């Protein structure tokens, strides 16, 4: 009891965590995981929302991130029997165990057969297997022969029994199979490397294709911009043509206005001449009327003076007549005649006054008409001068507008010619670039198709090699199985014989040591 006190009955074993790098697709390859954890069979993680562990997806080559991202989780590996190992693992273990058994049997036989020289008769199956093993051993490489030389040199000293020959042939077959398997593995490894290189080249081609597509899209956008610029230029050309048509219409309207203005000016000159003639006629009539009025006024003044003289004389003569008492008929007649003459003079005077008033009214009307005509004439003269100034300004403005329009049209034509040339050059360069890009795209598509074809061919070759390997394994395993069965039966018989010979081992050990020394000396 005292010895058990303080002793540790259990220990805690841990596996150190390892950081594994991700590949380009954010995945973990099975080979990298195997190098980090030899013997692992899978990956899993624990989610807080679930009460069970979740396994990581495996597509046969690599582990994919769960949900498209690894996130900050703790991932664990299964350390158990390899479930993703190659198809050769069981065969390798079987061949290794078989080789160990063969070596043990050879040691026992070499130890036991030193004293006894009994031969064991070969069965027909054993002869067939020996023939097949001889045919297979003839195809082995130099390395297998070099590996077998120590065994052959050790056995060639003395004559080999059929059982020893069978075991030697089986050893040769196993080593040859191992070499063939290694060569096939190397070829598969090379094919996988080529496949990875082809995948990388395909990815590069895809990236180049995407870049070329993006460049083509950029060139298409630039081409659309150039097309829009060409449309704008066409619209500007249409606008310029419409403006030139408007200018031509305006020039036609201005020409028609000039014609109308000249016609109006000519008609105005004609009207002015007719008015001037009327004014001259009215002035002549006015002068005649004024002369007549002057004569009438003179006659009126004479009549008034005569009236005043007569009235003065009558007033002077009336007291004289009253004093004389003019009562005679002659005096009365003279008086009546004088009165009649006075009345006639009064009538003439009234008539002259009415004529004078009419002449004054006609003079005033003629003066008013003359003033209105003068005002109209001055207004027309001012209007004519304004129209002449305006026409001169219109002519100068039209000349300026025509010159400006000509200069603007020429400048716009030059600019449009330059822009058209630049656009044509850019369009030509863009066409060349597009043709180059199309050629690059065609070349990249051809490369991609070639790479895809090569990838398919490599996949076909890999699948063919795998099938050939499986068929070779099956072909090689069938005779091995038969040989193992026959060997198991022979081993059972040999074990029986070995049991019989166990009693003789102690007595024959000295002979075995002596025979070994003799064999070493012979070697």
Image (tube, rainbow, N blue to C red):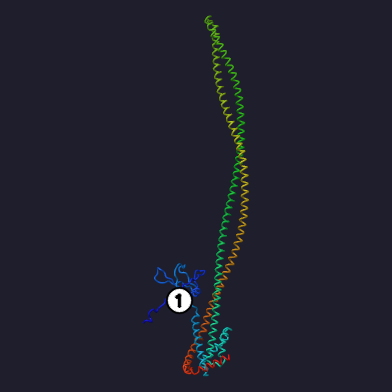
Q: State how many labels appear.
A: 1
Name, please, the residue furthest toward the top: 324
Give coordinates of residue 187: x percent, y percent. Answer: 56, 78
Q: Residues within 10 Å of mark 1 (few under 14, many from 20)?
A: some
Q: At numbered mark 1, what does the secondary structure look like: helix, strand or loop?
A: strand
Q: Nearer the viewer, residue 102 or 279?
A: 102
Kindly identify the residue that appears in the image at 59 percent across and 31 percent down: 378
Quarter occupied by the N terminus: bottom left
Quarter occupied by the C terminus: bottom right
Hey, which quadrant is residue 393 in on the image?
Answer: top right
Give coordinates of residue 144: x percent, y percent. Answer: 56, 84
Give coordinates of residue 315: x percent, y percent. Answer: 53, 9
- Horizontally, residue 144 falls left or right of residue 493, namely right
Hey, which quadrant is residue 453 in on the image?
Answer: bottom right
Hey, which quadrant is residue 458 in on the image?
Answer: bottom right
> Compared with residue 122, is residue 321 higher up or lower down, i.e. above or below?
above
> Compared with residue 99, is residue 20 higher up or lower down, i.e. above or below?
above
Give coordinates of residue 503: x percent, y percent. Answer: 47, 94
Q: Nearer the viewer, residue 60 or 148?
A: 148
Q: Nearer the viewer, residue 471 or 322?
A: 471
Disc 1 target residue: 79
> Compared with residue 291, is residue 492 higher up or lower down, i.e. above or below?
below
Q: Nearer the viewer, residue 72 or 122?
A: 72
């Amino acid at each position: 009891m005292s010895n058990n006190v303080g002793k540790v009955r259990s220990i805690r074993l841990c596996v150190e965590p390892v950081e594994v790098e991700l590949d380009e697709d954010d995945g973990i390859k099975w080979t990298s995981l195997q190098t980090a954890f030899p013997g692992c069979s899978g990956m899993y993680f624990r989610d807080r929302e679930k009460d069970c562990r979740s396994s990581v997806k495996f597509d046969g080559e690599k582990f994919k991130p769960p949900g498209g991202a690894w996130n900050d989780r703790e991932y664990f590996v299964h350390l158990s029997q390899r479930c993703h190992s190659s198809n050769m693992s069981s065969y390798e273990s079987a061949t290794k165990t078989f080789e160990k058994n063969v070596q043990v049997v050879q040691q026992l036989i070499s130890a036991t057969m030193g004293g006894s020289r009994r031969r064991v008769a070969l069965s027909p199956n054993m002869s067939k297997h020996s023939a097949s093993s001889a045919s297979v051993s003839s195809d082995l490489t130099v390395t297998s022969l070099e590996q077998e030389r120590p065994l052959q040199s050790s056995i060639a000293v003395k004559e080999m029994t059929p059982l020893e020959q069978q075991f030697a042939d089986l050893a040769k077959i196993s080593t040859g199979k191992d070499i063939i398997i290694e060569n096939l593995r190397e070829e598969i490894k090379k094919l996988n490397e080529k496949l990875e290189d082809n995948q990388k080249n395909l990815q590069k081609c895809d990236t180049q294709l995407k870049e070329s597509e993006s460049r083509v899209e950029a060139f298409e956008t630039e081409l659309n911009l150039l097309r829009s610029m060409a449309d704008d230029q066409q619209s500007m050309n249409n606008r310029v043509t419409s403006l030139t048509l408007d200018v031509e219409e305006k020039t036609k309207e201005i020409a028609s206005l000039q014609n109308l203005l000249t016609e109006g000016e000519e008609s105005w000159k004609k009207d002015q001449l007719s008015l001037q003639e009327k004014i001259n006629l009215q002035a002549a009539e006015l002068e005649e009327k004024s002369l007549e009025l002057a004569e009438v006024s003179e006659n009126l003044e004479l009549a008034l003076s005569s009236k005043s003289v007569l009235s003065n004389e009558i007033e002077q003569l009336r007291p004289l007549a009253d004093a004389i008492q003019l009562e005679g008929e002659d005096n009365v007649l003279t008086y009546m005649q004088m009165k009649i003459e006075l009345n006639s003079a009064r009538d003439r005077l009234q008539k002259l006054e009415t004529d004078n008033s009419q002449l004054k009214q006609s003079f005033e009307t003629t003066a008013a008409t003359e003033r209105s005509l003068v005002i109209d004439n001055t207004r027309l003269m001012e209007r004519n001068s304004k129209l002449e100034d305006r026409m001169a300004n219109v002519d100068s403005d039209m000349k300026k507008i025509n010159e400006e329009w000509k200069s603007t049209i020429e400048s716009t034509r030059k600019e449009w010619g330059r822009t058209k040339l630049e656009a044509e050059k850019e369009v030509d360069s863009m066409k060349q670039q597009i043709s180059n890009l199309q050629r690059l795209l065609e070349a990249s598509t051809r490369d991609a198709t070639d790479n895809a074809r090569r990838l398919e061919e490599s996949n076909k070759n890999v699948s063919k090699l795998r099938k050939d390997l499986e068929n070779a394994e099956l072909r090689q395993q069938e005779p091995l199985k038969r040989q193992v069965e026959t060997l198991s039966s022979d081993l059972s018989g040999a074990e029986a014989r070995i049991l019989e010979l166990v009693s003789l081992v102690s007595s024959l050990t000295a002979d075995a040591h002596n025979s070994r020394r003799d064999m070493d000396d012979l070697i």
